[in-house]
């Protein structure tokens, strides 16, 4: 959950070029003619999206599976006066997604969305690699935002799939929007060491003290929907296993200080990058656990023996 730069393109920057050379015939009900007739409508819808996004009010959007062509636009007899969400989905898939090797403007727009990331991290989970583009408001329900860059986000395959299965237009359940919602000033992620349990494991939750009830509810909803608690806990356990050997070495070289310094150094580095990353919170949890510091560290070597470590590294 992190903030991205707003997209490089707006609809008006590429819409005309997107339609160059596209079929416009009886077979597709003169789609190009109909698309040209809704250009202003799509730009207005995009501008309204921008206003609502900045106002944290995207949940007030109304689902629209059919775009009506404005009544003041004259069309020849026989040309439908609507564009369906299915047609807009097709426009997205063939004009924007296109093929990776395409040099047309649509693919350029698509690639610019994919490339707008922090170290290629998915902005929904802040962990997995970006592989695809997601529609924040689904294209099947919001035909007017099917090709609107401000509604298109870089995303990992898992978040894309988990998000797809569930969609509710509710103020408390809107996912954190990577173009509008900056939550970096909030200390929203919590982690604790699961004490008196071996091997060392972690538990992740969203803080109850964010101070903004709607924001807190949205983060909690996203955390649950994308199963981030398990994702972070699993990765923290793996990360800890990789660090045990160094931690034991530091502890053995100076039992009173070095293990603590090791944790503090790691915490400092990760916090510098992102104070709400699962890594920052993992080291913070280790540092805050009296059980870990006093009882577990002296036992680490015994539990994580060489054989056990080897087994862990292999798994
Ligand atoms: Zn993701």
Image: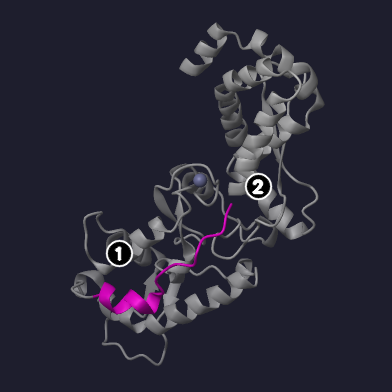
Magenta-colored span: 1-19
Which image quadrant is residue 48 in? Answer: bottom right
Residue 138 in the image, given as x and y percentages of width and height: 48, 59
Q: Earlier in the sequence, mark 2 or mark 1?
A: 1
**Secondary element at tag 1:** helix
Residue at x 55% of width, y 8% of height:
306
The colour scheme of the drawn protein is one colour
| Camera sees residue 149 | yes
Residue 193 in the image, given as x and y percentages of width and height: 73, 28
Which image quadrant is residue 227 in? Answer: top right
- For residue 132, side relative to residue 53 (left or right): left
**Residue 7 versus residue 296 in the image, above or below:** below
- For residue 238, side relative to residue 42 (left or right): right
Viewer-proximal residue, 163 or 262? 262
**Secondary element at tag 2:** loop
Can you name the residue that lies furthest to the front here?
Answer: 254
What residue is shown with label 2? Answer: 275
Mark drawn on residue 272: none
Mark drawn on residue 108: 1
**Residue 12 versus residue 200 in the image, above or below:** below
Q: Is residue 69 magenta?
A: no
**Residue 263 versus residue 183 in the image, above or below:** above
> Mark 2 touching mark 1, by CB under 8 A?
no
């Amino acid at each position: 959950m992190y903030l991205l730069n707003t997209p490089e393109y707006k609809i008006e920057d590429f819409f005309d070029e997107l339609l160059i050379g596209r079929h416009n015939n009886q077979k597709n009900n003169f789609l190009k003619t109909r698309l040209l007739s809704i250009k202003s409508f799509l730009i207005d819808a995009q501008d309204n999206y921008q206003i609502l996004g900045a106002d944290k009010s995207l949940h007030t959007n109304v689902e629209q599976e059919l775009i009506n062509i404005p009544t003041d636009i004259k069309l020849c007899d026989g040309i439908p006066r609507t564009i369906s969400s299915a047609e807009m989905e097709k426009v997205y898939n063939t004009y924007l997604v296109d093929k990776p090797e395409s040099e047309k403007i649509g693919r350029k727009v698509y690639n610019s969305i994919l490339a707008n990331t922090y170290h290629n991290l998915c902005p929904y989970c802040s962990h997995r690699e970006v592989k695809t583009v997601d529609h924040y408001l689904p294209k099947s329900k919001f035909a007017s935002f099917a090709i609107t860059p401000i509604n298109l986000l870089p995303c990992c395959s898992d978040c894309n799939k988990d998000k797809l299965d569930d969609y509710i237009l509710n103020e408390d359940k809107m996912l954190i929007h990577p173009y509008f919602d900056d939550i970096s000033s909030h200390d929203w992620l919590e982690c604790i060491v699961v004490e008196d349990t071996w091997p060392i494991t972690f538990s992740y939750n969203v803080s109850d003290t964010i101070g903004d009830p709607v924001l807190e509810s949205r983060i909690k909803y996203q955390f649950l929907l994308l199963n981030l608690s398990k994702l972070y806990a699993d990765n923290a356990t793996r990360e800890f296993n990789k660090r045990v050997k160094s931690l034991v070495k530091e502890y053995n070289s100076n039992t009173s200080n070095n293990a603590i310094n090791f944790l503090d150094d790691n915490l400092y580095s990760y916090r510098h990058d992102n104070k709400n990353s699962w890594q920052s919170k993992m080291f913070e949890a280790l540092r805050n656990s009296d059980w870990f510091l006093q009882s577990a560290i002296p036992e680490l070597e015994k539990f994580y023996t060489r054989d056990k470590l080897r087994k862990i590294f292999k798994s």
